[in-house]
Amino acid sequence: MITLFLASSLDILWGILAGIACALIGVAAGYFLRVKMHEKSIKESKRLIEEERKTAEEEIEKYKKEKTEETNKTIERLRSECDQDIKERKEEIKNQERKIQSREVSLDQRSVNLDRREENLDRKEQSIDDRKSALEEKHTKLDAIITQQENKLQEIAELTTDDAKKIIMERTQEMMEEETAQYIKDETEKAQDEAHEKVKMILANAMQKYAQDVTSERTVSVVQLPSDDMKGRIIGREGRNIRTIESLTGVDLIVDDTPESIVLSCFDPIRREIAKKAIEYLVEDGRIHPAKIEEMVERSKSEVNQYIRECGDKAIFEVGVGRMHPELVKILGRLKYRTSYGQNVLDHSIEVAFFAGKLAAEIGEDEVLAKRAGLLHDIGKAIDHEVEGSHVELGAQLARKYKESPVVINAIESHHGDTPADNVISVLVAAADALSAARPGARSESLENYINRLESLEAIANDVKGVEHSFAIQAGREIRIAVKPDEVSDAEIAVIARDVKQKIEDNLTYPGTIKVTVIREKRVQEIAK
């Protein structure tokens, strides 16, 4: 019984031990399995982390590359801007250097002129000193003569001292008055000669520093055609095309027997230029009908207006007067299509600006302001055919409207003598205007007008009493008058010259100036046999 109990207890004990062993084995297996799974999870996590790290590094590298490229572009752009800024600054410095060099040349010339003036003053002072010494010597001699005369008068005439002094003082006064009058006359003539030479030198220098070709303008334009058949196409059915062109442009088309050409006639050069361009475009396009004509006329107007603006900008840049109101620039460009006595008004204005600037530089005035006044002095001619009033009045109104300097306004108002000049620059502009108009070839006129003007000059001179002959020379710029010496004295020839000059100013219209020279000559001849 005990044996069975022990056997069964052992079996139970072995069963418990086996269970415990199995439990321990299960726990150990579970632990090892969990460890393996944890290691696998760690490896997977490490793999994912590595992939994320690689992805992050790639993104960082990509971002770094993009930022590097962007930075390089920015650096390149900044470098280009810096180079452009440096280039502009260098150009500005060069311009300043050129201006400084020009100013230095002007100062050198002014210094030379001052040296010349100083030399002239020294010579005059020396001459005055010499004359003063001569006068003192004469006074000494006169005192001696007076003493001798007093003694002789007292001895011979038995005059009192007071009477003798009175006679001597009267004679001395007469002698001194004659000496003084002669001295004043000599010095006046000398000053006039020097002033005349100085003025001629200044004017010559101003004209020498500027030269421009002169072109003669006309009131007609000729358009060349590729063939005579094109004339018929321009005329159109029952003349509808030519009527359309004339109505849109205000220009008369003259279609005559001249081969391969038509003539445009109009006193407005701008309209004539628009019509010419429109016809040239129509000929080039080949399609000529009212709708196409209207299109080409509009295109031509746009191009001409653009060209006018470019002419204004070019004139301002060429003269160098700084900025100007945009509307005034357009009006200035219109002078390209305005003429006066055949002279292009814009070219004339540029020439006057240069002349006025050079004259101002010669006498130490504001050169830029003088150029500006000269450039704008005829600005009213751009609108005088559209607005009522003289070009002087209209020019002054435009200058006031666009806030120009009072000096410029006065120069416009006074360059024809309508208003007194209140500053030196206005006088210089008037002189430059006369120079530009009077120089040879600047203005043209018809042969008939030219002959009539010469005949009128000679007729005015011949009507004066005492005139024997008169001759208009130098293309009507000078008239020489020979008077009858038996009827006219030397003193009267000055009166005749003034009378003829006044009659010319009152009765004739002419560009520039006319010189009047009166000649009196008396000859005596004898024949030896």
Image: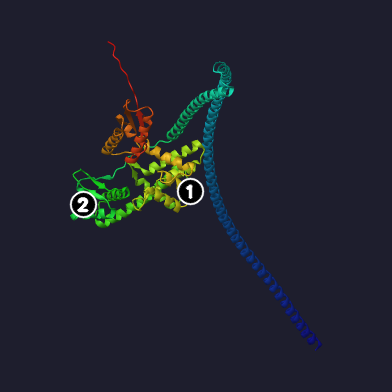
**Residue at numbered disc 2:** 235
Q: Which residue is drawn at 75% across and 81% down?
A: 16
Farthest residue toward the right?
2
Compared with residue 4, is residue 29 higher up or lower down, i.e. above or below?
A: above
Q: Residue at x 30, y 56 (%)?
A: 295
Disc on res. 156 = none
Q: Can residue 214 be seen in this view?
A: no
Tally of numbered discs: 2
Image quadrant where residue 475 sits: top left
The type of residue carrying mark 2 is Ile
**Residue 135 image point, x, y percent:** 56, 23
Compared with residue 278, is residue 141 higher up or lower down, i.e. above or below?
A: above
**Residue at numbered disc 1:** 406
Q: Can residue 49 be seen in this view?
A: yes
In the image: residue 129, left or right of residue 319:
right
User: Dots 1 and 2: beta carbons under 8 Å?
Assistant: no
Nearest the camera: 325 or 89? Answer: 325
Question: Considering only order in the chain, which callout, 2 or 1, is on the residue closer to the N terminus?
Answer: 2
Say which element carries label 2.
helix
Image quadrant where residue 349 sits: top left
**Residue 257 image point, x, y percent:** 18, 44
The type of residue carrying mark 1 is Pro
Compared with residue 101, is residue 84 higher up or lower down, i.e. above or below?
A: below
CA distance separating discs 1 and 2: 53 Å
